[in-house]
Each structure stands twice: as structure tokens, then as C-alpha cells.
Amino acid sequence: MKKIAMLYLGRKGAGPVYAYEMALALSKHNCVFVVLSSFIENKKSWDSVVKVDKNLSVKYVNTYNSIAGFLFSSLNIFHFIKIIKSINLYRPDLFYSPMEHFWDVAIYPFVKCGLKIKTIHDIKLHKQEDSFIYRFFHQFAFKQADKYVILSKKFTKDLVDKGIKEQNIIHIPHANFSYYADKQENRNFHFNNKILFFGRILEYKGLHILLSAMKIVTKEMLDIKLVIAGDGNISSCKNDIEILHDNIELHNRWIPIEDVKNYFQEIDIVILPYIQASQSGIIPLAYSFSKPVIASNIGALDEQLYDGKTGYLVESDNPKILSEKILQLMKSPDTIHKMSKECYKVYKNEMTWEASAKKIMECLSD
């Protein structure tokens, strides 16, 4: 049985769930020690599982929960010493980070371990994250580990261009997000006449394109509802939202983990009108609720979405084509039902966390 040390210092969003699922999968056949932020959003889940999983242990460290806290904590060298010391005392065979963090640059070089692996979720920074501070820390991500996990084959060349040897690149597709869905959930099909835009509202997510498409859709489907759920600045979309107010259900706030299922259970399809993308955690999340997806055919989204089976891929930044696909699906509940079954098959049989953990462990025998 191998000893694995995991480091995840993020607090909110899909990251805490990704780390949790991976830790559980790795602990089935290994001893896993995880260093986490004490402010992690799903702390209760971690606390519960360590009580029953003898192969899993957790150490919390105070990070930050505000910008001021980030600046103060980042200047406190004792935080980093404490983390490094706890990992080195564990003497892991493998050191693994399931997602990048600003503090990695001060921790990774000092961890004593034969093999260091890091998952890179975005090889290229998104437009609204491409600032000097992000670029500064992001460039170090490609110099700290021995091997790198990417979630999409399409970005292998981009990583090679950054100086990483291809034999040190591991492709592990984004696994399903069963964490959010009840195992005994009732999956009887009901048509709700609702579509969903979910997640952080940033320009590259393309909400403005979806709203333009909705102006076309509502001319033919008067009662259709678009559920918008996520935090972010919607000022640029305010006029379109007001025009479509009878067809919009707006929840412009951070969606806590425990509330996620409420938004996916009562809708029919999920829309990803992105104008830039690597891969998306929303697609496996939609599959976990048996919901088809309409997504822009950009980045590596075509590696996650089976066009015509689990949804549709559409041309990016084209409201007219997007509206046509929305109408095509929403006017055919039988097609949605058929696709829902395919989504459930993918959720149950493909992209499992056990397969992901196995690929990580195979690196030790390379």
C-alpha cells in the first residue's frame, strides 16, 4: 500500500469536490494524507469521511477567506513551513495536487518526494483571468512537478510547447460529479420547459450570446424559462435580462454546494454558450443529473459531449444557430428523454474516479 500526500488549498466551487472525489478513489487502495484549507466549502464532507475511511487522514491549515486575508497569509512564511513540514514528516511515495493554487510556488520545491504530480485544469488562462498576477503564478505551475495531468488530449501540444516532455503528460478525462446527485435519486423523466445556465458569470462563458438566442427562442416558445444561476457581474446583460424578464429566473449569487442539486433537478437541458474553453466541469455535472447539454464546439468540449447523443455541439458566438438547437430539443421532449438516458450511461460507466486514480498510481511504476 503506497503513501500519497495531497495538497488542495482552494476553498469554493468545483475544486473542493474534485479533490474530495479523487482522495476517496485513491484511498481505496492507498494511504492518503490530505492538506486542506480550513475554509474549504465542503469541510463537513471531509470530516465525515475521515471518521469511516481508515486510509484517509486530513490536516487543515488556515489560508484566507478575503483579499486582505490572502495578502496577509501569503506573507506569513510560517504557513508554508507548517505545510511543508507536515507533508515531509508523512514521507509520501507520491505528492499530488488536484488543482493549482497560488501557494504552490512556495511549497512544491521543498516537498521531499520521489514523484510529484500536478493536475492542470487550464493550460491557457481564460480572458478574465489573464492578468499579470495570474500569469506570474501560472508559469511556475509548469516547472514544479515531475508529471502533469491534463483533462483533455487536445491540449497535449500546448503543454509540450511549455517545455514538458510528452511522456510526462497524463491524460485523465474529467470524471463524473456524483457528489451532488443522490444515489437513490428519482430519475423518472419530467419535462419542465426550463433550460439552465450555471456557474460563474464571466464574459468568456457567453451569457450574452445565450440571451440573444433566447430572444429568438421566445418568439416560438412563449413559456420557456431560462434559469441563470451563478455569481458574477451581469451589468452588461442587464438590458437583455429586463427584456426577457418573463422568461428569466435569475439567481445572481454564489451557489453553495448543498444547493447545486436544486438547480439541476428541475430543468431539461444545460447550455454552455462559451466563447473560450478548455474542458468543463459543468458537463459531467449535468450528466450526473441525466441532463443533456448544448455547448459551443470550442476547446476540448467535443471530448466530453457526444454530439447527437448526450446533447449538441454548436458554432461558438452564433445566437441564431444556438437558438435553433434549443428549439429543436425543447420542442421534442422524447429526444430529451432519449438523450437523458445516454447521459446517465456516461455518468455510470465512463469517466469514473476509480479509473482516474488508477492512472495516477500507474505513474509510480513507470
Image: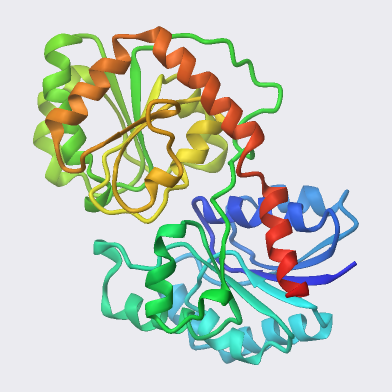
Q: Is residue 173 above or below residue 283?
A: below
Decide which of 230, 353 is in the foreground and name it.
353
Q: Is residue 30 left or right of residue 199?
A: right
Which residue does the image show at 45% across and 39% down from the upper left? 283
Q: Is residue 320 above or below residue 83?
A: above
Quadrant (top left, top right, bottom left, bottom right) of the N terminus: bottom right
Residue 333 visible at all: yes
Q: Is residue 35 left or right of residue 196?
A: right
Quadrant (top left, top right, bottom left, bottom right) of the C terminus: bottom right
Where is residue 5, by image quadrant?
bottom right
Report x, y in % for residue 202. Answer: 27, 51
Report x, y in % for residue 139. Answer: 40, 82
Residue 212 visible at all: no
Where is residue 276, by image quadrant?
bottom left
Report x, y in % for residue 153. Answer: 46, 58
Q: Is residue 35 left or right of residue 317?
A: right
Which residue does the image show at 66% across and 28% down from the upper left? 182
Report x, y in % for residue 333. Answer: 39, 9
Q: Is residue 111 left or right of residue 192?
A: right
Q: Is residue 184 above or below residue 64?
A: above
Which residue does the image show at 35% across and 29% down from the upper left? 196
